[in-house]
């Protein structure tokens, strides 16, 4: 008879900031997921359509979600249970699972469509860098060219999806973390440098422009608000990413290091220490993705908006190149291609990995698989790791506009944000170990964040319906 696997011994948390930084990781994985879809594509497109007007919304979208993210993580450390299982504990109508799980399941396909759009961007880049027949470049050069149906983008989309499935199937957390973080950092720094150098060009933004962007203005074009609403749902941390964060915390070991929950002072001290580490992780990631998001937005507003260029469809990547031309000139194309490949592929890799874990847990909550058996769960994650990149490929090969796929996923996540916020409030005040409760200031910020989710989602949907169905 096989011996039971021994329970790992608890680990004392680091007591210094330097020590805590050594355990940073889950938050950066979430950041790697959104930099490609949220920052490079959706944020830059928002800047291209709205100009500087919505800078305030972009910053708000990055800062407002961190309090909910921490609360979901706090519960996971407290109970050793991921967010989807926790949300299933919330009262309400049930059929095998509660209403939140079914709402997540209904929205998940639209949210996962983002991965199809991201794969489309990866395929465009590969078709430009390593053409097989060259038909994609020929189609781009023609105003009526059907670039989406070319052999090159379909070949590279299929190849990259298959390679990702293999990498996720044979890889584990450490490999995924190293690949993702390394791929994002360099291009983000290049983009920040691009924004800085634009201030010495004809595309500079004045202090008055920045003040205008922070003055809570609204765009004149309805399309710009639709794009901004979708962008709000996926920049920084999207609704699905908020749910997924706890899975990376578990794989990093935060909850395991606390040890099984008990009434001892030793457990409480360890848990408080690891909650502090988790906060460092989330706030470091927030600083990274906020700076990156603002940088991408500013190059969209400064260059693409002024030149009336809108990254869209199968011309998405070729249009984004223009945002780097004023600074990097003839080197802009290869710089953008290499950098965009880094951030888009990292988004596709980590987004697919997170989705595999999330769906595996969802199947367990619904009773489709045995969620109490770690081996069954791992097999489910492995199989989903093979399948989900192929689902993203099917979205892409269906012929949908890659940017539209990303925006549809963003809208779905914006609608889901108030529900996730409600779940975080319920966990905070009803289920999380009260000994780990934060202070009143933190609670006030958490409540304000959740109210913000409702206001932005509600006002955004109202604005869209008003503009779409207004009488001519």
Image (tube, rainbow, N blue to C red):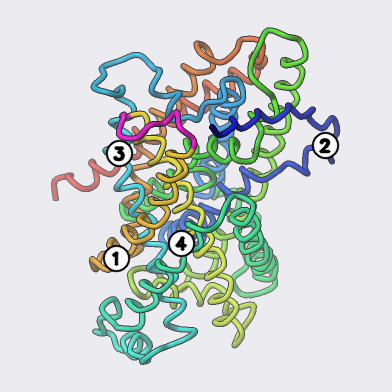
Q: Are marks 1 and 4 in contact (CB under 8 Å)?
A: no
Alpha-carbon distance for marks 1 and 4?
Answer: 13 Å
The residue pinned by badge 4 equals 41
Q: Position of residue 439 (x, y in %)?
A: 67, 15
Q: Are dots 2 and 4 in contact, CB under 8 Å? A: no
Q: Earlier in the sequence, mark 1 or mark 4?
A: 4
Q: Nearer the viewer, residue 386 or 322?
A: 386
In the displayed orientation, state which residue is furthest to the left.
Answer: 471
Name above or below for residue 266 compared with residue 103.
above
* Cβ atoms at labels 3 and 1 below 8 Å apart: no
Element at label 1: loop
Point 37% across, 68% down: residue: 120
Is 372 in the magenta? Answer: yes
Residue 167 visible (yes or no):
yes
Can you tell which of label 3 and label 1 is closer to the viewer? 1
Q: Which mark is residue 17?
A: 2
């Amino acid at each position: 008879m096989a011996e039971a696997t021994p329970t790992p011994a608890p680990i004392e948390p680091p007591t210094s900031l330097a020590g805590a930084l050594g355990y940073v990781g889950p938050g950066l994985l979430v950041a790697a997921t959104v930099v490609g879809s949220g920052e490079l594509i959706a944020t830059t497109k928002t800047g291209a359509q709205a100009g500087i007007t919505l800078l305030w919304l972009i910053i708000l979208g990055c800062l407002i979600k961190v309090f909910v993210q921490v609360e979901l993580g706090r519960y996971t450390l407290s109970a050793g249970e991921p967010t989807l299982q926790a949300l299933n504990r919330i009262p309400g109508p049930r059929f095998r699972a509660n209403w939140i799980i079914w709402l997540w399941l209904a929205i998940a396909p639209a949210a996962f469509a983002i991965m199809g759009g991201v794969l489309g961007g990866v395929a465009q880049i590969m078709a430009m860098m390593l053409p097989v027949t060259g038909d994609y470049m020929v189609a781009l050069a023609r105003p009526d060219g059907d670039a989406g149906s070319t052999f090159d983008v379909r070949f590279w989309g299929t190849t990259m999806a298959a390679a990702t499935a293999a990498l996720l199937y044979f890889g584990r957390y450490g490999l995924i973390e190293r690949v993702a973080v390394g791929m994002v950092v360099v291009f983000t720094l290049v983009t920040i440098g691009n924004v800085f150098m634009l201030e010495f060009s004809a595309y500079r933004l004045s202090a008055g422009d920045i003040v205008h962007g922070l003055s809570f203005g609204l765009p004149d074009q309805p399309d710009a608000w639709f794009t901004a609403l979708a962008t709000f749902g996926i920049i920084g941390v999207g609704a699905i990413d908020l749910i997924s964060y706890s899975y990376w915390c578990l794989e990093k070991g935060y909850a395991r290091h606390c040890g099984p929950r008990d009434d001892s002072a030793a457990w409480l001290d360890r848990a408080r220490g690891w909650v502090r580490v988790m906060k460092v992780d989330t706030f470091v990631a927030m600083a990274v993705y906020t700076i990156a998001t603002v940088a991408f937005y500013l190059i969209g507003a400064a260059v693409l908006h002024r030149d009336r260029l809108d990254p869209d469809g199968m011309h998405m990547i070729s249009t984004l190149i223009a945002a780097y031309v004023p600074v990097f000139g003839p080197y802009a194309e290869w710089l953008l291609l290499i950098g965009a490949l880094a951030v888009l592929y990292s988004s596709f890799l980590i987004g697919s990995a997170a989705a595999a874990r999330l769906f595996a847990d969802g199947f367990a909550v619904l009773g489709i698989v045995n969620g109490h058996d770690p081996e069954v769960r791992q097999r489910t994650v492995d199989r989903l790791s093979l399948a989900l990149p192929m689902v993203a490929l099917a979205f892409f090969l269906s012929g949908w506009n890659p940017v539209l796929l990303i925006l549809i996923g963003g809208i779905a996540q914006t609608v889901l944000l108030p529900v996730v916020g409600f779940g975080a409030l319920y966990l905070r005040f009803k289920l999380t170990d009260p000994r780990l409760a934060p202070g009143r200031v933190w609670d006030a910020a958490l409540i304000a964040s959740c109210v913000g989710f409702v206001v932005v989602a509600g006002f955004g949907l109202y604005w869209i319906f008003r503009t779409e169905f207004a009488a001519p």
